[in-house]
Structures are given as structure tokens and as C-alpha cells.
């Protein structure tokens, strides 16, 4: 079977969707069960880590370059030069659609919220969440409109829609009107193939009093609340530090630098919009607590990564967080500085709460294996052709 894939998220600095697709490809190209399949990866530019990405013994890979329109290219949706979002739309709806019509695959896999609408081949679409529908106030009107229109139409036209949690499946059914029989829940996983330091598990770990956040910064993730809560804890503890890793993509802007500057302990806070995998692995190995105060997610992977690295996690008390993290988390009100600060203090004291979370972590983590995620996703692609 020939599987065409929208692979544009495999960029120079993959995050989120790019890492999701990279892990699937790493498993499919190494799995004997996928040996009869050919993966045609449509992409604007070849990723520098493609040799690490593609393995042997499984599915074969063919790269197909479809360059994006230039920044100065006019948009067909109105006057003026097309911004990145609309250039992506042109690439997807014109270039990718034309390639799929010219050389039809057995199935087209679109792992990033939308798919070409003018194709006749079966489409499998991944919707990681639908925050742009549930909370349009978190997005600029152009970006929000683009996401809502394309995601809704793509989901309704797709042969199958993959999402990562029962919560997200219910949201897609209720808010987008996608029939439940068309939606398949396939959780993400934490046993990464890419970007690992193979010696990390063997080395003794010396935990430092570092509070860590990793993830793109959106309004729903309440990073300013974390900064204020950390400031309160830091006033009583001279050794703790906060490290925030993630690009600020919030609307309206969170102004993370200003939040840190106004915190009263800016010297003990670090914000890094992006770090390489090796540095991220080192942070996971050194930090003592991971905090993720998101009020809306389709899944929420980075807290699981932190658990896998041996860190207790503090997360917002939401339905999806209860579903994904089970007993292996401290649940807090994500808008309450007091609640977050109290949880930080309890975990820094290394008492019963910390022990209970780490004791529960193995039972939770065993549910999230990339081998199972890749196999389940491949079954959905195979079934979509029948």
C-alpha cells in the first residue's frame, strides 16, 4: 500500500506535530509489519535529521519536494502578500492536492489538523485538539477563522479522524459534528526513538531545585500564573530556579519577558523559546518538578515525558488531565497562584505527595508506548482504504 503523508511539520526545528510524525515514521520504517508499505513524504524542504528518522526493515520512504509559495507571493484570499498561515494553506490546498491527484496514493495521511479538500483519495486526518473551536478568543481572528474552516471541513470529509483522548473525541463529535464511528482514539507515547541520549538512563541523576515548564506558550497554559506562584515560593527558598522552554504563541501576547522582569526574582528564571533535544533531555534529568497548567488540551505530552524522566508533575485539574495522568500528578486550580504555590512547596519538600506521584508513574506510563501508537495508527490507515 502506498501512503502519502503531509510531512511539512518535519522542519528544521520540529515541535508538537513534527515530533508526533517523526516518532511514527521512526517506528514504521523499522517495523517488519509495515514492510509492504511505501511512504511518500511530501515536504517543502528535506529535514536535516532525515537519516536518523528513517530506519531499515520496515516501510520504505520516498521524499517529494513541493516548495511553499514565497513570502511575497500574493494570497488568493485577498489583497497583499500571503503570511505564513496562508502560504501553508496554498501549499496544502493547491500543491499537495495537485500532487495527490496527479499520482494518487491508496490513502493520504494528514497529521496536522487539516487536509486538501479537493482530492478523491481516502484521507486520514489527525486532530490533536480543537481549541480554536472551543475557545476562539485564544486566537487572532485570521488564524482562528482559517483553522476553524479548514479543520471542520477536513474532519467532515475525512474517512477517519484520529485524536489522542476520549475527551478530545467527544469534543470533535460534539463541536464539529463528526460521527463517532469516524473518530479513532490513539494516545501519544513517551518512549522516544529520536533525540535520546542512550546513556542518560545509566548515569546517576542529581536532581536540582529546578521547576520546569516545556511546551509552546498559549493563553490556556497559564504560564504567568506559574511565574507568580514560583515567585512566592522563591521568596522563602533561596535555591530554587524556574526554567520555561517554549515559543510564545499566545493571543493576546503573554509578554513572558515582562512577566519575568516584574516577578521580583528574574535572576532565578530562564525563558528559552527553543532548545535542542540533547539540552531538553538534560533539563528533564536535572529538574525536580514539572508544571503544566493548561486548561484545554487534546492530550498533553510533555508532563508524561517529565514523569518518564522521574519528575513529579503539577497539572491543571481538567477532565483530560485526569484521563491521561491518572494518579500520577498533583492537580491544581490553574488560575490560583496560592494553589500552585502550595503544590510547589509540597513537592520541593520531598514528602508524601512526591512519593505518591512517583509510585503511580510506572502504572500510568506503561499505557503510552510508541510501538503501540504507531501500530494502531497504521491500522487506521489500512482500514481507511477498505
Image: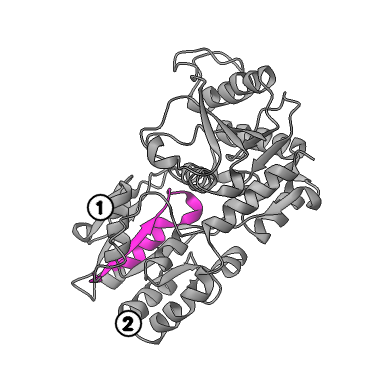
Q: Where is residue 347 drawn, in percent x and y?
A: 36, 78
The residue shown at (44%, 74%) is 339
- Label 2 vs label 1: CA separation? 29 Å
Q: Is residue 221 above or below residue 367?
A: above
* Lateral position of residue 209 relative to residue 147, left or right: left
The secondary element bearing badge 2 is classed as loop
Image quadrant holding the C terminus, namely top right
Q: Using the image as rendered, state which of residue 269 and residue 187 is in the foreground.
A: 187
Q: Residue at x 49, y 15 (%)?
A: 81
**Residue 84, visible in the rendered structure:** yes
Q: Which mark is residue 350?
A: 2
Whichever of callouts 2 and 1 sits on the residue coming sooner in the sequence is: 1
Name the residue carrying label 1: 261
Residue shown at 68%/49% (left/top)?
379
- Give the secondary structure at mark 1: helix
**Residue in the foreground of this view, choosing between 304 and 88:** 304
Q: Which residues are magenta?
A: 205-231
Quarter of the figure with residue 310: bottom left
The 10 Å Cα crowd at callout 1, few under 14, some 14 to 19, many 20 or more, is few
Q: 103 left or right of 22?
A: right
Amino acid at each position: 500500500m502506498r501512503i502519502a503523508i503531509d510531512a511539512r511539520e518535519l522542519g528544521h526545528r520540529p515541535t508538537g506535530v513534527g515530533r508526533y510524525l517523526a516518532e511514527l515514521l521512526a517506528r514504521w520504517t523499522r517495523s517488519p509489519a509495515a514492510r509492504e508499505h511505501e511512504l511518500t513524504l511530501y515536504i517543502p524542504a528535506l529535514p536535516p535529521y532525515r537519516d536518523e528518522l528513517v530506519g531499515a526493515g520496515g516501510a520504505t520512504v520516498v521524499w517529494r519536494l513541493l516548495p511553499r509559495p514565497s513570502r511575497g507571493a500574493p494570497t488568493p484570499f485577498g489583497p497583499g502578500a500571503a503570511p505564513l498561515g496562508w502560504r501553508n494553506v496554498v501549499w496544502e490546498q493547491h500543491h499537495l492536492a495537485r500532487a495527490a491527484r496527479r499520482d494518487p496514493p491508496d490513502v493520504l495521511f494528514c497529521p496536522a489538523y487539516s487536509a486538501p479538500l479537493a482530492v478523491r483519495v481516502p484521507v486520514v486526518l489527525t486532530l490533536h485538539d480543537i481549541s480554536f473551536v472551543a475557545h476562539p478568543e485564544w486566537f487572532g481572528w485570521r488564524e482562528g477563522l482559517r483553522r476553524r474552516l479548514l479543520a471542520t471541513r477536513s474532519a467532515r470529509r475525512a474517512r477517519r479522524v484520529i485524536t489522542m483522548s476520549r475527551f478530545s473525541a467527544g469534543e470533535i463529535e460534539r463541536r464539529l459534528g463528526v460521527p463517532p464511528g469516524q473518530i479513532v482514539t490513539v494516545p501519544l507515547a513517551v518512549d522516544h526513538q529520536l533525540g535520546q541520549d542512550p546513556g542518560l538512563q545509566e548515569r546517576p541523576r542529581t536532581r536540582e531545585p529546578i521547576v520546569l515548564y516545556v511546551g509552546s506558550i498559549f493563553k490556556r497554559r497559564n504560564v504567568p500564573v506559574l511565574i507568580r506562584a514560583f515567585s512566592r515560593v522563591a521568596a522563602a527558598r533561596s535555591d530554587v530556579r524556574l526554567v520555561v522552554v517554549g515559543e510564545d504563541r499566545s493571543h493576546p501576547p503573554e509578554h513572558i519577558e515582562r512577566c519575568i522582569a516584574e516577578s521580583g526574582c528574574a535572576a532565578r528564571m530562564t525563558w528559552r523559546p527553543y532548545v535542542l533535544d540533547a539540552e531538553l533531555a538534560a533539563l528533564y534529568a536535572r529538574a525536580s518538578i514539572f508544571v503544566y497548567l493548561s486548561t484545554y488540551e487534546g492530550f498533553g505530552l510533555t508532563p508524561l515525558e517529565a514523569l518518564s524522566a522521574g519528575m513529579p508533575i503539577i497539572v491543571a485539574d481538567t477532565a483530560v488531565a485526569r484521563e491521561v495522568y491518572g494518579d500520577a500528578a498533583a492537580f491544581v486550580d490553574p488560575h490560583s497562584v496560592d494553589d500552585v504555590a502550595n503544590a510547589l512547596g509540597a513537592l520541593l519538600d520531598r514528602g508524601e505527595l512526591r512519593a505518591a506521584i512517583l509510585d503511580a508513574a510506572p502504572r500510568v506510563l506503561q499505557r503510552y508506548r510508541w510501538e503501540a501508537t504507531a501500530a494502531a495508527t497504521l491500522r487506521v490507515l489500512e482500514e481507511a482504504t477498505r
